[in-house]
């Protein structure tokens, strides 16, 4: 079955299907599985956007219909993921290790298998750069920062096993960057469950692979990233000039979800907000003012936490002893992606954190991301200077590329 007309469905009997009819028509069917956010994703960005707009009688959004300024600038998307076409076989000494593998799925898709179960079904655009570039061109995305699918960060593996898997992922990203250096930027991974190996891998990423930065999760096995045990890592990242992109993963509060909504929908915003807050309350933001760090999903609930933190700082002398400046000062140093979906929400985070701190994100190629980030920006009614900043200039500064 051709990829363009392949049926797309979630790992638990699907959420979206696109089938060809005789004569080349296209049918969109929403399936009854609201909890399949970790299921099939693939090219759902382009599939959903284009098919739905055709069904509604509108032409799919293309760069020609975007604001001329945004089209000309060619956005830098800092939030996009890869999954390799295959994983190396497990060669460690452990037993019952949740080592990932790939298994065939329907046309143009593969299953990511963990512990013998389908974790997620992904489209080949996860590993084929040509498919990815075609989708980028449709959405006026000039460059993507490639980072691993967050579940592959593997903090729960024994560190020796994690080192092997993470090095493989980093080199897979490096190969994609080497093939298309004008379109891709690498954000690798490190085994943060052990600081010393993490520091070695960070050095390898920056000094050998020449990546501008890395992706880390919002916590490491339940410990917030602002915890003092991670201070040496952030100190090293600041010294090396490495950018850090923080993504929610295995979030707090999953046990309190009511109904069929996925954890990525309900719990990611809270978890990324906790991570950002911990960087302030743990003192890392104060001690490392030159650290460049960005938070996924618009920072989640963080824009609403900051005013509460500011009030607590004003009325709690003890808090001012450990955090010399108002929390908002630190919050406005961090970066935040645009994955908030609504133009009004985008304007809100710009107002909360500053136009200089917002960067484009899509979560490509997964379905819960923004299928048209440039469209979201266009509809927000931003002025030209803010548009230039959000579309490209802020990302260049975050990645340490502003002088290039």
Image (cartoon, rainbow, N blue to C red):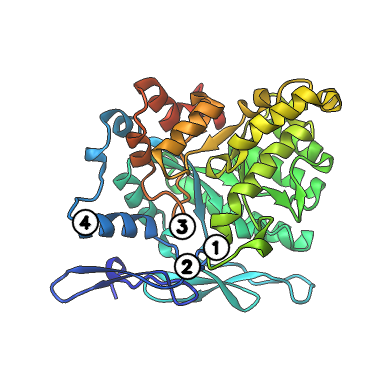
Q: Nearer the viewer, residue 330 or 137?
A: 330
**Cα distance between the residues tagged 2 and 1:** 7 Å
The residue depicted at 22 percent of the width and 67 percent of the height is 26
Position of 241 relative to 143 (above/below): above
Circle nearer the N terminus (2, 3): 2
Residue reaching furthest to the left: 23
Q: Earlier in the sequence, mark 2 or mark 1?
A: 2
Mark 1 lies on residue? 262
Position of residue 368 measured from the top left corner of the image (x, y, whole percent): 46, 56
Residue at 55% x, 63% y is 262
Q: Mark 3 points at which residue?
A: 366
- Return the residue at label 2: 34
Q: Is mark 1 on a helix, strand or loop?
A: loop
* N-terminal-most mark, 2 or 4: 2
- Answer whether residue 113 is visible to the viewer in this image: yes
Secondary structure state at the residue bearing disc 3: loop
């Amino acid at each position: 079955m051709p990829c363009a007309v392949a049926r797309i469905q979630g790992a638990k009997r699907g959420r979206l299907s696109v089938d060809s009819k005789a004569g080349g028509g296209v049918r969109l069917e929403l399936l009854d599985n609201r909890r399949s956010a970790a299921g099939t994703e693939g090219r759902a960005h382009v599939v959903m956007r284009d098919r739905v707009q055709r069904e509604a009688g509108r032409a799919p959004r293309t760069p020609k219909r975007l604001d001329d300024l945004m089209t000309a600038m060619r956005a830098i998307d800092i939030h996009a993921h890869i999954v390799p076409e295959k994983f190396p076989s497990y060669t460690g000494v452990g037993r019952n290790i949740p080592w990932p593998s790939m298994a065939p799925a329907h046309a143009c898709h593969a299953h990511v298998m963990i512990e013998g179960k389908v974790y997620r079904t992904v489209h080949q655009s996860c590993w084929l750069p040509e498919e990815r570039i075609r989708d980028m061109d449709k959405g006026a995305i000039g460059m993507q920062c490639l980072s691993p699918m967050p579940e592959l960060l593997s903090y729960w593996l024994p560190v020796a096993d994690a080192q092997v898997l993470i090095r493989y992922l980093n080199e897979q990203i490096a190969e994609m960057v080497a093939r298309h250096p004008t379109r891709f930027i690498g954000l690798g991974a490190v085994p943060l469950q052990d600081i010393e190996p993490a520091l070695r891998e960070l050095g390898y990423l920056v000094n050998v692979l020449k990546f501008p930065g890395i992706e880390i999760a919002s916590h490491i096995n339940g410990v917030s990233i602002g915890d003092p045990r991670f201070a040496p890592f952030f100190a090293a990242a600041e010294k090396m000039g490495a950018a850090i992109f923080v993504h929610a993963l295995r979030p707090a509060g999953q046990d309190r979800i009511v109904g069929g909504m996925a954890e990525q929908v309900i719990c990611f915003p809270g978890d990324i907000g906790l991570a950002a807050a911990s960087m302030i309350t743990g003192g890392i933001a104060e001690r490392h003012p030159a650290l460049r760090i960005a938070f996924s999903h618009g920072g989640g609930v963080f824009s609403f936490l900051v005013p509460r933190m500011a009030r607590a700082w004003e009325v709690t002398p003890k808090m001012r002893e450990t955090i010399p400046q108002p929390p908002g000062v630190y919050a406005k140093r961090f970066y935040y992606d645009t994955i908030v979906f609504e133009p009004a929400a985008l304007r809100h985070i710009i107002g909360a954190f500053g136009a200089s701190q917002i960067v484009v994100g899509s979560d490509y190629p997964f379905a819960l991301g923004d299928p048209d980030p440039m469209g979201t920006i266009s509809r927000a009614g931003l002025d030209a200077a803010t548009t230039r900043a959000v579309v490209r200039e802020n990302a260049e500064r975050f990645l340490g590329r502003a002088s290039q």
